[in-house]
Image (cartoon, rainbow, N blue to C red):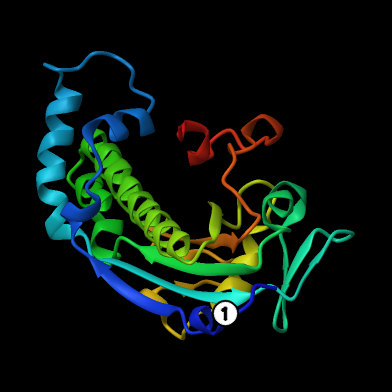
Amino acid sequence: MIENTDILFNIEKEVSLDFEQIRPAKEQILQAIHYHDDCRDDVVCDTIKQLLRQAGEKADIRIGYKLYPVLKAERQTKSIILEQTVLETKPIIFAQLHKADYLLIFAATAGAQISRWADEYVQQGDPFTAYLADAIASETVERAADWLEVRIGQQMAKKGLNITNRYSPGYCGWDVSEQQKLFSLLPENCCGIRLTDSSLMLPIKSVSGVIGVGKTVRKTAYKCAVCDKEDCYLRRRP
């Protein structure tokens, strides 16, 4: 365990972001929808530009997080133990987190209105625009999580610590039901997100996960080659 850890124990926060702070680029939306054509004069690009101008009025971006010391990394069960909570992360994620001295537990949302944005266009009989609005909403919350990852990395670097990539239940073999455990570690009603019995987050455009923190952890490439989740957003990350 790291010495002089009292400076870390009280890291618990909820922040709100303006859309322009994490505004997705047009190119990120095109990548998200697997659109690879040059569309400088294309209806797809024109519609994305129009929607991005509207997205800021729809978004209510909030991020909450709390840092916990790791009590033990259990190699046999591929689990990380925090206080009374055992996170059964499975092999891929455990390999990245087992050297962590701390785990940052987080949740982020783009808000209820932008989560329902695509439905407005569906009701208008415009599935094309609905598809693009949904992609922008999804990318918005991912950019919020990216913002947190960068912020925490900078804060921890000042303390001489490193971070891992972020990892979420539902990816890399980590069961989505583990979200119930993550939310039990966050303040009640964190970011206004609630979980259904099936561990679906509401608003829909929300994410949760963990970031490892420690002296010997490091960021590595996501292990997409050994994962069978074809629709994973991490496959298109650099």
In the displayed structure image, the side of residue 55 where residue 232 appears, left or right: right
Q: Nearer the viewer, residue 184 or 93?
A: 93
Residue 179: image quadrant is: bottom right
Q: Position of residue 100 (x, y in %)?
A: 66, 62
Q: Nearer the viewer, residue 189 or 101?
A: 101
Residue 167 visible, this orientation = no
Q: Nearer the viewer, residue 132 or 147?
A: 147
Q: Position of residue 35 (x, y in %)?
A: 33, 22
> Would you name the residue on which mark 1 appears?
185
Q: Helix or strand or loop: what does disc 1 sit on?
A: loop
Residue displayed at 13% across by 35% down: 49
Q: Position of residue 177 (x, y in %)?
A: 65, 65
Q: Quadrant of the C terminus?
A: top left
Amino acid identity at mark 1: Leu
Q: Residues within 10 Å of mark 1 (few under 14, many from 20)?
A: some
In the displayed structure image, the side of residue 32 where residue 50 appears, left or right: left
Residue displayed at 30% across by 50% down: 140
